[in-house]
Amino acid sequence: MIRINLLPYRAAQKKENIRRQISIFVLAVIMVVGTLVYYNISLNNDIDALNTQIKNTKSMLARLEKQAKKVDEIKKAFNTLKQKTDVIKNLETNRKIAVQLLDNMTTLVAEKVSASQSETSADSDSKPVKRLWFTNFQENKDKINLQGIALDNKTIADFMSRLEASNLFMNVNLKTIKQQKVNELNLKNFEIICTRISRNKLAKKK
């Protein structure tokens, strides 16, 4: 009977199996390491891209904040200029109103026309003679305080009547009247208070 020794063959096969398993393990390790390296590189690239995007965003935000600050400064300067312009407009309007108001008052001052020494002469000259003068004029909104000097009481009364009849003033009242001597003349020092009629009230009144 022939006997065959299979021990060397089995040993070689066992070694081959071990070698194959080691190769598979090493290959698996290489694949895992390669995958981890690739994932790490990809992750680092993503991080770099995000850092770059954050840097660009911060830079853009800084530029926008700088521009917004300039816009705020421009708005502030514009508002300041507008306030100054409004003040100038109000002053100009009040100045015109005051001038117009004083002009209206002046036109209501009583005058007396006096003839020259020789009324029959050809060169006779008639000149208006002021019978009333203003010494102080104050306005607080629509309230007016007027002080002046007149020749007599009738001149003051006529002036107050003209104020009331002008449809520009109301509540005309004589606050004080005193005797005052000016250049040896006995004159009347007076103070009148009244209210200026606004345009809206004047329009309703009409």
Image: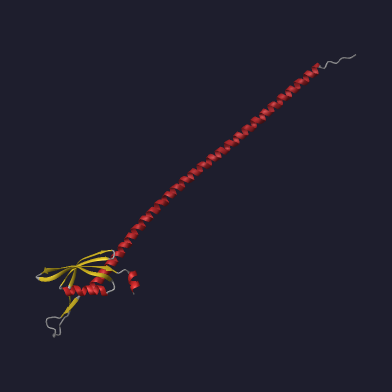
Quadrant showing the N terminus: top right
Is residue 109 in sight in this rendering? no
Is residue 45 in sight in this rendering? yes
Count of labels in the image: 0
The percent position of residue 160, horizontal first and vertical second, equals: 22, 72
Which residue: 69% across, 26% down? 25
- Pick the residue in front: 121 or 49: 121
Give the colour scheme of this rendering.
Answer: secondary structure
The percent position of residue 156, horizontal first and vertical second, equals: 19, 72
Residue ranking furthest to the top: 1
- Pick the residue in front: 129 or 59: 129
Q: Is residue 40 left or right of residue 24?
A: left
Tell me if residue 29 comes above or below residue 145 in the rendering.
Answer: above
Tell me if residue 149 comes above or below residue 4 in the rendering.
Answer: below
Q: Is residue 152 left or right of residue 196?
A: left
The percent position of residue 83, horizontal first and vertical second, equals: 35, 57
Residue ranking furthest to the right: 1
Q: For residue 134, what is the image quadrant? A: bottom left
Which residue: 32% across, 59% down? 87
Quadrant showing the C terminus: bottom left
Which residue: 16% across, 73% down? 153
The percent position of residue 97, horizontal first and vertical second, equals: 29, 67
Q: For residue 112, what is the image quadrant? A: bottom left
- Pick the residue in front: 167 or 14: 167
